Image (cartoon, rainbow, N blue to C red):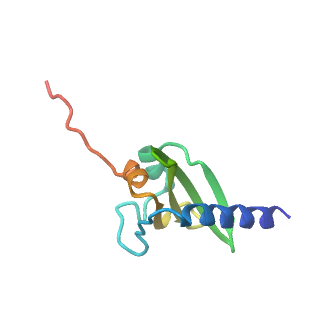
Amino acid sequence: MARASLRVAALALAAFTAGCATEFEGERPSSLYGQHTDAAVALYGPWDEALNLNGQRYYLWRRSVETDEGLRFCELRLEVTERNVIARRLLQGYPDACQLFAARFVAGDRN
């Protein structure tokens, strides 16, 4: 029963984001590949949801931006191995919301 609920939730989310522009990273290399999920948590904060779908573990983060048409969303999905090592990354949703996942490095003051 719980698996069915997770699948329904995943399908509903996919249908919800389908109306938005999408940006896929798919198989494009990411500096997160091969790292423990702690690296992603350090960049993005705690995940919003953890799912098991078809025997595969995923961690999801969501961001949103306000537009004239209302809130628009982006979802970052990390597929992880049994040892919580990042195997794949998928970014999908409204491009401006997806930009909120961009890593920004700011040089600090050095005394």
Q: Residue furthest left?
A: 111
> From the viewer's perspective, is 7 left or right of 30?
right
Q: Residue 16, percent across and down?
A: 60, 61
Q: Please tell me how many numbered marks the rendered image carries.
A: 0
Q: Residue 76 or 34: which is nearer the viewer? A: 76
Closer-to-camera residue (29/99): 99
> In the picture provided, is 54 more to the left or to the right than 97?
right
Q: Residue furthest right?
A: 1
The residue sitting at 47% across, 66% down in the picture is 90
Q: Which residue: 66% across, 60% down?
A: 51
Residue at point 55%, 67% (across, down)? 18
Q: Name the quadrant containing residue 1.
A: bottom right
Nearest the viewer among 51 and 91 is 91
Task: Please state, as top left, top right, bottom left or bottom right, where the C terminus lies in the image.
Answer: top left
What residue do we see at 48% from left, 60% from top?
Answer: 93
Q: Along the horizontal axis of the image, is 82 left or right of 104?
A: right
- Residue 29 position in % (x across, y down): 35, 70
Residue 94 % position (x, y)? 45, 57
Q: Is residue 25 left or right of residue 1?
A: left
Residue 12 or residue 38, whichever sits in front: 12
Give residue 3's position: percent from left, percent from top.
78, 66
Q: Residue furthest front?
A: 68
Dividing the picture into quadrants, the one containing residue 12 is bottom right
